[in-house]
Amino acid sequence: MRNIDERLKELNLEKELVEIRRHFHKYPELSGKEYQTMDKICKHLDEWGIQYEKGVADTGVVATIKGAFPGKTIGIRGDMDALPIQEKNTVSYCSQNPGIMHACGHDVHISILLGVVKVLKAMEGELKGNVKFFFQPAEETTGGAERMIQAGCLENPYVDYVLGLHVEPKYKVGQVGIRYGKMYASSDMLTIKVYGKAAHGAHPDKAIDAIVVAANILNAIQTVVSRNISPTNAAVCTFGTIHGGKVRNQIADYVQIEGIMRTLDLETRILVRERVGKICEQVADSMGARAELMIEESYLPLINTDEVVDVVCHNARRILGMKNVVIEESPDLGTEDFSYFAAERKSCYFRLGCTNKKNESAADLHNPAFDIDEGCLAIGVKLQVQNILSLLEK
């Protein structure tokens, strides 16, 4: 650890990390449009003499440092895209792109990853193995991780382990949160179409009321979570839109319902899909109607590998102290496309505290007032450098 601290001082990296982060925060770009972000990353890599490939999954970058000695290959990921949010902060590095903001901390993730690149470049003569750096686009929308994997980022050389982190305002600078096993949920987008028969509202006997059928379907679906999923597991079926009918005195012949499904493992995901599908079909049929369920599959569940979590926990406790490493009891039913890396390789994804110790009311992620204490930048670099070195020694 002393060696890593010395490297940061020799490189004057803490100051540079702040400058790098503020640049990316000032010029955010939306998913799939991270062209200037990509070019700026490549400019840093050129200055430092790093081998890289740009344009991976359109706007991603894969950089590689090859150690002086043979060994494993570690992958480390930082996502790049911003959100369609108008920033409310008045800092000097406030977003200059109207309606776009790094409100989820991806500017921090890029900067930490670049910091890790620079430290390990200075140590490449000592490295036993290789390190690949995934500057990943489109985490917020289309799942850029999956497309980078399809483009071959985990091969040539073959990646043995993958690391990732996310800034977390509920933790102070100098704290981390980590979880064994299930950490984030999978996501599916659900569309239910209910077909009935229209008639005048005064003559319900001549109709098949699609609204009543839809209401029964929605009520029945709520029993999937409450009665088909173990209380020690978790799942969510949420429907956010329902549209049907044209006028108040006509019985509707069509209703469309849209929602999401979140589950924490493949078995539960399959079970919920099957139960929702049967409920739609059978409830509609019992009422003389017809229903169709369409499922648009989104992110996989993110499941950490215990072996890698052990390494990250050990290093975090050594660097930050036992009390500053929080082992989280419950998974998050949000989603994270690092899950695609975790499904392919042994991985660990953890949360990095980014809130000033005196600030008890820090804005949450995806909030137009979100900002960080920049002290978390150097901590993130130290942790990830040590994690990489430890995994290379395994």
Image (cartoon, rainbow, N blue to C red):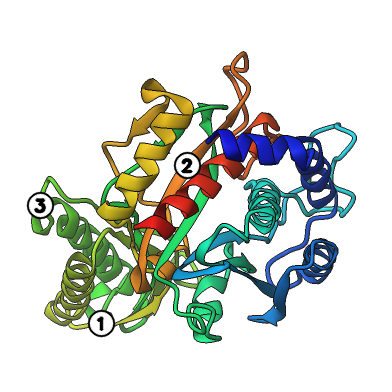
Which class describes the residues within 10 Å of circle 1: few (<14), some (14-19), or many (20+)? few
326 and 263: which is toward the camera: 326
The residue drawn where x is 62% and y is 60% is 125
Tell me residue 17's x, y (percent): 76, 42
Amino acid type of the residue that numbered disc 2 sits on in the rendered structure: Arg
Q: Earlier in the sequence, mark 1 or mark 2?
A: 1
The residue drawn where x is 81% and y is 61% is 44
| C-alpha separation, residue under disc 1 versus residue under disc 3 | 42 Å
SS class, disc 2: strand
Which class describes the residues within 10 Å of circle 3: few (<14), some (14-19), or many (20+)? few
Amino acid type of the residue that numbered disc 1 sits on in the rendered structure: Lys
273 and 384: which is toward the camera: 384
SS class, disc 3: loop
Residue identifier under label 1: 206
Residue 11 sits above or below residue 74 on the image? above
297 and 5: which is toward the camera: 5
The residue drawn where x is 42% and y is 30% is 318
| C-alpha separation, residue under disc 2 versus residue under disc 3 | 27 Å
253 and 353: which is toward the camera: 353
